[in-house]
Image (spheres, rainbow, N blue to C red):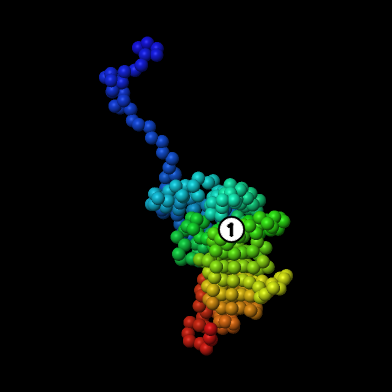
Amino acid sequence: MTAGQPLHTDSPAAAHHQQHQPPIIIKHLPPPPLPASIVPSYPPPESDAAESWVWSQIKAEARRDAEAEPALASFLYATVLSHPSLARSLSFHLANKLCSSTLLSTLLYDLFLATLAAHPSTLRAAAVADLLAARARDPACAGYAHCLLNYKGFLAVQAHRVAHVLWHQGRRALALALQSRVAEVFAVDVHPAAVVGKGVLLDHATGVVIGETAVVGDNVSILHHVTLGGTGKAVGDRHPKIGDGVLIGAGATILGNVRIGAGAKVGAGSVVLIDVPPRCTAVGNPARLIGGKRQGDNVMPGESMDHTSFIIQQWSDYTI
């Protein structure tokens, strides 16, 4: 055959070549799933490698879920499996959740990632503690990936922490804009100046309001429709201070610069206007104390999620 002469596809040699030449198909699929047996349900031991441990579990769960439910494969690959770290995955997911036509996802992604990278020992460690808290305390939490991707309480707290950093950097207009978007998207309204500890669970989260000078300690659990608010038009330090390990039931309202002591419980629907001592339970409207620490019980209510006091497991004279 001379140069430039066309190949006759109807020749026996050409037909034989085409018959045995398999078609080339390029597939862009997520990595193969890991066995479900390597996705444990227990929290990691206390160590500096907690973030790496949790991230490895999130990726394993995402691979498993992508294999089990192909309809979610693209979503899981875009939000988890294509990212090299928890910080990048969280930044990407938050940016896409909170963006709007005028607040671009690329801007938010850069903002979240830069803030998380600058505060690894606070913001990133707190995010890991929040993931562990949700998995340990919420029986409906199917896994760490489930919390990262679907728990709006978790996502709202992570966005708040970034807004809190912006607030103290003097970028208050941006911090308030971020607060507004979080309230619109997640129905959780936390002022950027409020202080929120680590290991915090906003269970269901809808309708949670936390005011400007409020402080929420570590390992606190807060149910939906809880308000930590002021009592009027007063300025200055005017919002509640919640101690470590506190449990606040659904629909509870705590108003004013009052202190809820470490390990205390506030019953669902209660209205608290005065201090609650540590390890005590307050219920009612207006709330009153109905009991203290059970003898020998060292588990904080915020971690046990026990909404019933040992006193009110039997009939008593308290009224609501």
Query: Which residue is pictured at 66% across the width and 55% down the height?
Result: 174
Query: Seen in the image, is 263 located left or right of residue 237?
Result: left
Query: Which residue is pictured at 48% across the width and 60% down the height?
Result: 42
The residue that disc 1 covers is 181
x and y, in percent, of residue 54 in the image: 52, 54
Which of 276 and 190 lies nearest the eye of the viewer?
Answer: 190
Considering every residue shown, the one lying at the far front of the view is 101
Tell me if residue 154 can be seen.
no
x and y, in percent, of residue 43 in the image: 51, 60
x and y, in percent, of residue 88 in the image: 56, 49
117 versus 131 height, above or below: above
Considering every residue shown, the one lying at the far left of the view is 12
302 versus 275 height, above or below: above
Query: Which residue is pictured at 39% across the width and 52% down the height?
Result: 69
Query: Which residue is pictured at 31% across the width and 21% down the height?
Result: 9
Which of 159 and 292 lies nearest the eye of the viewer?
Answer: 159
Query: Seen in the image, is 101 located left or right of residue 36?
Result: right
Considering every residue shown, the one lying at the far bottom of the view is 317
In the figure, residue 227 lies in which quadrant?
A: bottom right
Which of 201 and 137 lies nearest the eye of the viewer?
Answer: 201
Tell me if residue 71 can be seen.
yes
Three-letter code, disc 1: Arg
x and y, in percent, of residue 93 in the image: 53, 52
Dot 1: few (<14), some (14–19), or many (≥20) neighbours within 10 Å? many
